[in-house]
Image: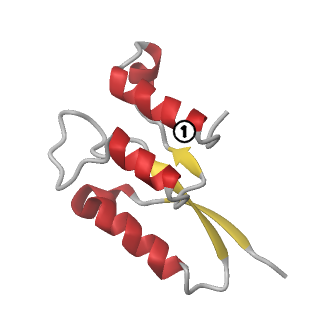
Amino acid sequence: MELLLQFPIHMKLLNVCGMNGIKYMIHSASFSPMKIFFGAPSCVPATTMETAGSNIGDKEIEELFYKDYCSHLSEVMNYPGVIYNDPLVIKKLNIAKRYKKCD
C-alpha cells in the first residue's frame, strides 16, 4: 500500500534557512517510505514589513518547479497582492500556471 502525504513547507524554517532549508526537507523526505508532495512557499517573508533571514522570490519558485521539487504553489496568503495585482505575487502565480502547478 502506498501512503501519500501533501505537505506545505513550514514557513519558520524557510524564513531562516531559505532554499537550503527547502532542499534539506526534500532530501530528508526521500528516505521516508511515504510519498511526500511539497508545496512551494509563496510568501517568505510573509510580509514586506517582516525581517527574515531569507527571501523566496520568483527565481526560487521557478527553480523549485523546474527541478520538480514541489507539486504546487502553497499558501498564497497575500490576497491583497492578488486582488491589486502586485507584480511579484502575479509573477509567482504565472510561474505556477506555466508549470501546471495550480488551476
Q: Position of residue 11 (x, y in %)?
A: 36, 55
Q: Quadrant of residue 35?
A: bottom right
**Which residue is at 61% across, 43% downward?**
101
Q: Is 9 displayed left or right of 2 in the figure?
A: left
**Which residue is at 36% across, 39% downward?**
58
Few, some or many C-alpha atoms within 10 Å of disc 1 (few <14, some 14-19, many ≥20)?
many
Residue farthest along the right direction in this orientation? 1
Q: Which residue is mark 1?
A: 96
Picture quarter with the N terminus: bottom right
**Which residue is at 50% across, 52% downward?**
66
Q: Position of residue 64 (x, y in %)?
A: 46, 54
Residue farthest along the top direction in this orientation? 84
Q: Quadrant of residue 37?
A: bottom right
Q: Position of residue 89 (x, y in %)?
A: 40, 28
Compared to residue 1, the image places residue 60 above or below, namely above
Q: Nearer the viewer, residue 101 or 41?
A: 101
Q: Amino acid at mark 1?
A: Ala
Element class at badge 1: helix
